[in-house]
Image (cartoon, helix red, strand yellow):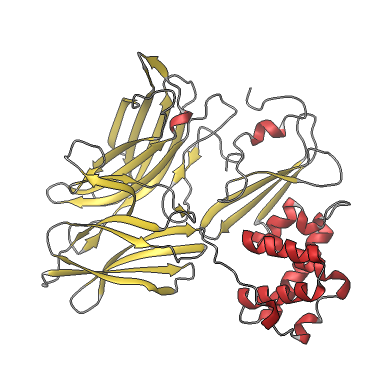
Amino acid sequence: MLFVIPFDKILFMRNTIVFIFLLFFSSTFGQKLRVYFDHKQFFAPGYGNYKEFIFQFAGESVYYQQQGDTLQGKIDFFIQIKDDKNQIVKEEQYILQTPAFTHHQISDFFEIKRYPLLPGTYTLYLKIKDTYDSIPVSAYQPFTVRDFSKKTSISDLTVIEYATKGDGNSIFFKSGYDIIPRLVNFFPKDINTLPYYIEVYPKDDTSNKVIIKEKIMDKEEKELFEFTRFIKKEKQAVIPIIEQIDISSLHTGSYILELSILDSLGKETAKTRYYFDRDNPPNYTYLNEEIVIDPAFQESIPSDSVFYYLESLIPISPHEETEHILKISKERNPEKARKHIQIYWAKTAPKNTHDHWLLYKRQVIGVEKEFGTSLKHGFQTDRGRIFLKYGAPSFRRIHPSLANEYPYEQWEYNRINQQSNCFFIFYNPSMADDDYLLLHSNVRGELSNPNWQIELSRRSGGNIGN
């Protein structure tokens, strides 16, 4: 994104359908102000439909000045909301004082704004500036306000970092709790619960109970029944719900948490969704002694290339399987190598296993021709690995060597798993052997280098933007 969109016209992109964005980061303009943004819709009797806009500032990205024994910064906020007729319906400008920190206690901090809005389509315009810096963050985001006042509805889902009983004096206060939101929808292996907050607004059911169905689906929207349950609540004008889901057994992948309201007949009347990614690879057991080699499968693995094709699985294998592949390759045991290849494709593609393997084999051969070098096989190069792992890019732009830049390539993907507008930057700092290294990507789990533009221009010792 940063190499396509002008810095002063950054449009928020839809990221895994949940609106979670890094508004801006640029190492080429002094301090790296980083602001994460999300928005949710709620309803309050007597107040109406309202939007909650959440901003999380990376504490170390802000300039601070000494205030006695502490450090404090200032953020200049400008917020404007226009309707679909381009009329201004909300506008606010103010100075946000950061919390007072010590040198060893700087942490992230939040700002939350809530605005009542009539149902309709709007655009949010933002200009956020560190008052001790000179570069503002300008961005805009279209959004829609639904009408929660006339029929049974459910709010947007807020994932909780932590929650405590509140007294109403905090910006995080809602329904008796101070709820600290979690804006990142990625759950690593060491996080085993998914706590959330929603509100239900019952309107049209005669029952005195409200039933909420909680379920998790995979990215193909197949319901995982072991993660399905029903929650019953007493009916009231606003039903606040704080729950948590045990995801310790949920393996690596992209998922959808869906909460739906059921009427007394079991019919769905409203629902909300939350899209998230999980990194939790299963403990893989290799039963080589019990695997019977399939002659038809093994005919497609030449004897002189068995270790080549074994190692070609590394780009698409999780870490613990990669270690096993390298161990087998080091042992130089062809039978184990053949069995591992067969095991991998049997568990990865239980249906049409052989066809999936042959398709991947053709891709490995193509990557070898396109990206192989005198020192590396194609699948060992960064471009080859990315191609095999994510497929062919939607767009590939090749930039030849310039006087002030190394040669580089820009790959763009419309979608990778549940993440949209993905890109990779590869460059060739050695200027030889066509071996392009991954310099930067916005894909979760890949190398992220905010200084990529500076690295790219080091050929001339320059600094882009200065």
Q: Is residue 352 above or below residue 140?
A: below
Tally of marks: 0
Query: Which residue does the image show at 67% across and 25% down from the upper left?
Result: 463
Q: Is residue 130 left or right of residue 321?
A: left
Residue 47 or residue 249, whichever sits in front: 249
In the current view of this chain or complex, which residue is farthest to the top? 68
Query: Is any atom of residue 391 visible in this view?
Result: no
Image-based side of 113 in relation to 254, left or right: left
Residue shown at 45%/22% (left/top)?
A: 63
Determine the residue positioned at 49% across, 54% down. 188
Q: Position of residue 407 (x, y in %)?
A: 78, 39
At horizontal 80% and vertical 78% (from top left) the residue drawn is 300
The x, y position of residue 435, in whole percent, is 81, 47
Quadrant, the C terminus? top right
Quarter occupied by residue 287: bottom right
Q: Is residue 205 left or right of residue 231?
A: left
- From the viewer's side, name the closer residue of 317 and 403: 317
Q: In the rendered image, is residue 44 in sight? A: yes
Q: Position of residue 366 (x, y in %)?
A: 79, 64
Quadrant where the N terminus lies?
top right
Q: Name which quarter of the figure residue 238 lies in.
A: bottom left
The image position of residue 393, as x and y in percent, is 67, 56
